[in-house]
Image (cartoon, grey):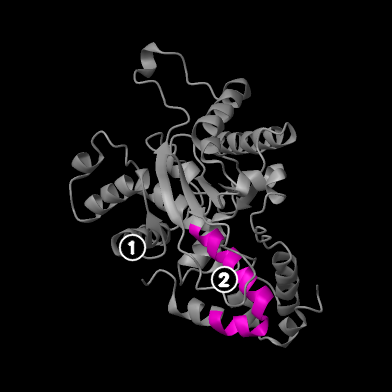
């Protein structure tokens, strides 16, 4: 495969970094390191679905995909777990040089749930438990109730980290979310081995999503942005220990820009098409954006923390674009670099 991408060695560092960002590949390092990252990442592109035939449908995995690609994107959390369902037809990645422009993903489901909630009256109730014996059933219930009914071909899971901002300590809440994340992987692998589900689980680094959508953040700021929610949002109200912390300005700026990108998408109908339950959530999002009181917008609807909803959607849409761009590089080679650099220069969140 290296010979297929031999043209990478003729590119400048800036061009390689831009190509890496456009395909969801690690964009840091020297030129030789970047080329190595790109060769590894481009080899992991999705295989287009074969044209539907009676013979192909005899294969269980193909039966699962005969309706196209069903992508479930999960933004991890215990109190605030957000997920969405994106659908694309079987022709999405079909290697046809005369194919029309990339298809717009359809968002059919978009919601936020609590895997576990604290007792309303802690003084009279036992302490909330986070034991593996309790969270194993939570993982099974979440997957069978909210994820597998969508018949997913791909499940994208926000990758968690153990430490934030280079600190030496590991936050207790971070361990809890990591435990639940690991249980999702283990449960899905078990389902696959038992023939209960056939699909692919894809870990997604939040820093790669931020780098794709939000311009102007350096690598250090992106790493700071990643992993802060579990420590400061999930444990809100429990007090924060003194120590090394991310700049609130940097974090809030990134969060606001991501939410703004999603609101613009919903308002303008660009980048994603909302249908069914997702359209109702989109109406709530726009109501909140237009200045309605939060209590009125959320009443009985469960809009909750919009940043989590925005994150799961941007994660799913970023992955879709990464796969489309990888396919473009496979098909056009160095010619694709010009198109992707133009897209990178315009900024993806600018409507």
Q: Is the magenta stretch mostly helix, strand or loop?
A: helix
Crowding at label 1, few (<14), some or many (≥20) Cα neighbours within 10 Å? few
Please name the residue that numbered disc 2 is placed on.
22
Above/below status of 43 relative to 173: below
Classify residue 250 by image quadrant.
bottom left
- Which residue, as the protein is rendered here, is positioned at the far bottom? 10
User: Could one spot residue 184 in this view of the protein?
Assistant: yes
Crowding at label 2, few (<14), some or many (≥20) Cα neighbours within 10 Å? many
Locate residue 286, reporting x and y percent: 26, 54
- Viewer-side residue, 88 vs 82: 88
- Viewer-side residue, 276 vs 336: 276
Above/below status of 178 relative to 164: above
User: Could you tell whether 91 is left or right of 234 in the image?
Assistant: right
Q: Is residue 337 magenta?
A: yes
- Viewer-side residue, 103 vs 128: 103
Count of marks overlaid on the render: 2
User: Could you tell whether 136 is left or right of 226 in the image?
Assistant: right
Q: How far apart are marks 1 and 2 (CA)?
A: 22 Å
Q: In which quarter of the image is the N terminus?
A: bottom right
User: Could one spot residue 168 in this view of the protein?
Assistant: no
Q: Give the range drawn in magenta.
A: 317-339
Q: In which quarter of the image is the C terminus?
A: bottom left
Q: Residue at x 39, y 50 (%)?
A: 307
- Viewer-side residue, 349 vs 244: 349
Locate residue 292, reporting x and y percent: 18, 49
**Which SS class for mark 2?**
helix
Q: Residue at x 47, y 66 (%)?
A: 213
Q: Which mark is residue 269?
A: 1
Locate residue 57, reporting x and y percent: 68, 47
């Amino acid at each position: 495969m290296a010979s297929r991408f031999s043209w990478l060695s003729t590119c400048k560092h800036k061009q390689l970094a831009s190509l890496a960002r456009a395909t969801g590949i690690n964009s840091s390092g020297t030129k030789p390191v970047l080329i190595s990252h790109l060769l590894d990442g481009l080899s992991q592109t999705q295989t287009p679905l074969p044209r539907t035939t009676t013979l192909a449908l005899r294969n269980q995995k193909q039966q699962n995909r005969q309706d196209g690609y069903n992508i479930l994107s999960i933004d991890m959390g215990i109190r605030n777990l957000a997920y969405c369902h994106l659908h694309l037809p079987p022709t999405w990645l079909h290697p046809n040089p005369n194919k029309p422009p990339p298809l717009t993903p359809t968002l059919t489901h978009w919601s936020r749930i609590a895997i576990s909630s604290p007792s309303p009256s802690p003084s009279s109730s036992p302490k909330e438990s986070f034991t593996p014996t309790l969270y194993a059933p939570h993982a099974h219930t979440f997957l069978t109730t909210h994820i597998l009914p969508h018949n997913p071909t791909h499940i994208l899971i926000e990758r968690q980290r153990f430490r934030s901002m280079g600190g030496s300590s590991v936050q207790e809440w971070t361990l809890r979310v990591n435990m639940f994340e690991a249980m999702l992987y283990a449960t899905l692998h078990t389902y696959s081995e038992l023939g209960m589900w056939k699909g692919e689980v894809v870990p997604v680094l939040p820093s790669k999503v931020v780098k794709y959508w939000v311009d102007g953040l350096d690598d250090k700021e992106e790493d700071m942005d990643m992993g802060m929610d579990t420590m400061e949002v999930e444990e809100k109200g429990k007090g924060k220990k003194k120590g090394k912390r991310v700049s609130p300005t940097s974090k809030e700026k990134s969060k606001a820009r991501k939410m703004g990108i999603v609101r613009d998408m919903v308002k303008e109908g660009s980048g994603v098409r909302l249908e069914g339950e997702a359209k109702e959530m989109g109406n709530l999002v726009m109501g909140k954006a237009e200045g309605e009181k939060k209590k009125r917008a959320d009443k009985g609807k469960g809009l909750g923390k919009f940043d989590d909803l925005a994150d799961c959607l941007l994660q799913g849409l970023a992955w879709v674009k990464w796969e489309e761009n990888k396919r473009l590089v496979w098909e056009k080679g160095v010619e694709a670099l010009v198109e992707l650099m133009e897209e990178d220069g315009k900024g993806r969140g600018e409507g």
